[in-house]
Amino acid sequence: MSVLLSDVVSGSAVGLRGRLWQLTTAELRAAAIEASAEILRLEAVRVAVVDELSLRPDDQVIASRGVGAWLAANTMLQVRDGKKIAALGAALRAFPAVAARFDVGDCSFEHAVLIVSFCESPPKGMPEEALPKCIDLLLAAASGVEATTTKVRNVIATLERIFESDEIPPAEDVDRNELRIASTLNGRVVVRGDFDALTGEMLLSALSNLTMPTPAPDGTPDSRSAAKRTADGFTELIRRYLDCAKTGMDGGQRPHVNVHINARDLAEHRDCAATPTDGGGSVSDLDVGHMPWLGPLSVSQTRLLGCDCFLSTVLLDDHGAPLDAKPGKRLVTAEQRVALIARDKGCAFPGCTCVPAWTDAHHIRHWANGGPTVMNNLVLLCRSHHRLMHRKSGFVGKWEIRIGVDNKPWFIPPPSIDSQRHPRPANTTFTT
């Protein structure tokens, strides 16, 4: 029995695996994209149906103590997921612009939740008439295939920075922190926690080098899963902490967390910062704190950290791109890597979310071919994309990297991906 592309998404998955070999690679890609779009469509349908059911509950829903619990009881969803679906449906009633974008499949469930959460609890300093414009900015960040949670959170952090108030953002509220450690019947220990962004940044920074895949001496790739590597790294972190015997010391140097912020926006007084007063300023002109692992951090929290830290300076040009730091050597210096992290904030390859700690500095024009070790010839790439540029069979030379007039990297895809070879901005380049 043959398989047609049109049948893949509309039909059952039973027996499908044994017939997919009949599709070309291009058809498989199209099927994956179509299936993903169908999931978004059905997710919007489910949210709308569940919300209508919550407005007209029958005996079954009432007996389940809410439509979210009823949905979980009659599907393979967990109760918390059923309640999240019901909560989003109820929240979207008040924000038709968000609902419209979600209903057409141009905004994911998770991003819709972030947006309505902001709309329901906006910064105290934000006037009511500013909400529609804020929704437009958030939807712009959440729409399309290039949308990422980091981009949405960055816009939220920027809006909170514009309408700066004394209110603590949820991501930075330490009063919400929880850590539960319990032993199980079979003698093991279960750990479950919920932390603010800064604590999470410290934890991820501490674990970074301890959780990377480590090949065997013979070159065999690390066979451990990501969860197993994290568990092993956490064990090693505890062991090193106890071995150092510094559990009673306070007030030492704390070089554990890196936060990038424009010096003007780090200023203590708001009239020194780049805050638009007439509505004519661009959101993209404003800066918020940025942590390599967890992304945006409010200016107020960044200023607090600035009172008790070591500051390093990275000189920027008019486009916000770092200038060169001690060029002339083949290996990237520590100063240059700091500048690259400030510019690229991780792997710059379009669509990649790899954090700076797991990236290499790549020479756009190879050193052996006369390429200098200067900022406009360097870009951060994760190990996978670095190998793709250097050694991966069939790819060497097909993707091109150029530094644009903004002094930031742009990626030109091969004709097999884009026949017109339109340049694509680095993954972290996003303006509202």
Image (cartoon, rainbow, N blue to C red):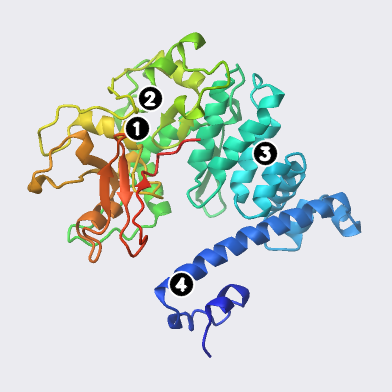
Q: In which quarter of the image is residue 38?
A: bottom right
Nearest the eye: 202 or 379: 379
Q: Earlier in the sequence, mark 4 or mark 3?
A: 4
For label 3, the crowd category at 10 Å Cα-Cα, with few meaning under 14, some 14 to 19 and many 20 or more, is many
Residue on which disc 2 sits: 247
Which is in the foreground here, disc 2 or disc 4?
Answer: 4
Q: In this view, does 311 lie to the left or right of 156?
A: left
Q: Position of residue 397 (x, y in %)?
A: 21, 58
Instruction: Kindly report the distance in space between the C-alpha atoms of the residues bearing marks 4 and 3.
Output: 35 Å
Nearer the camera: disc 1 or disc 4: 4
Identify the residue position indicated by label 4 in the image: 28
Dot 4, how many residues are within 10 Å of its Cα: few (below 14), some (14-19), or many (20+)? some
Find residue 361 and name its label: none
Please name the amino acid that badge 1 sits on: Tyr
**On screen, 54 above or below 116?**
below
Q: Nearer the viewer, mark 3 or mark 2?
A: 3
Image x and y of residue 269, in percent: 48, 8
The residue depicted at 17 percent of the width and 36 percent of the height is 332
Under tag 3, what secondary structure? Answer: helix
Q: How far apart are marks 1 and 4 (CA)?
A: 49 Å
> Is 31 drawn above or below residue 203 in the view shown?
below
What residue type is disc 4 on? Leu
Q: Say which mark, if any, is on residue 116.
A: 3
Question: In the image, which disc is placed on residue 241?
Answer: 1
Which residue is rendered at x = 69% and y = 42% of the image? 97
* Cα–Cα gap, marks 1 and 2: 8 Å
Q: Tell me if 151 is positioned left or right of 137 in this view.
A: left
Tell me the SS state at disc 1: helix
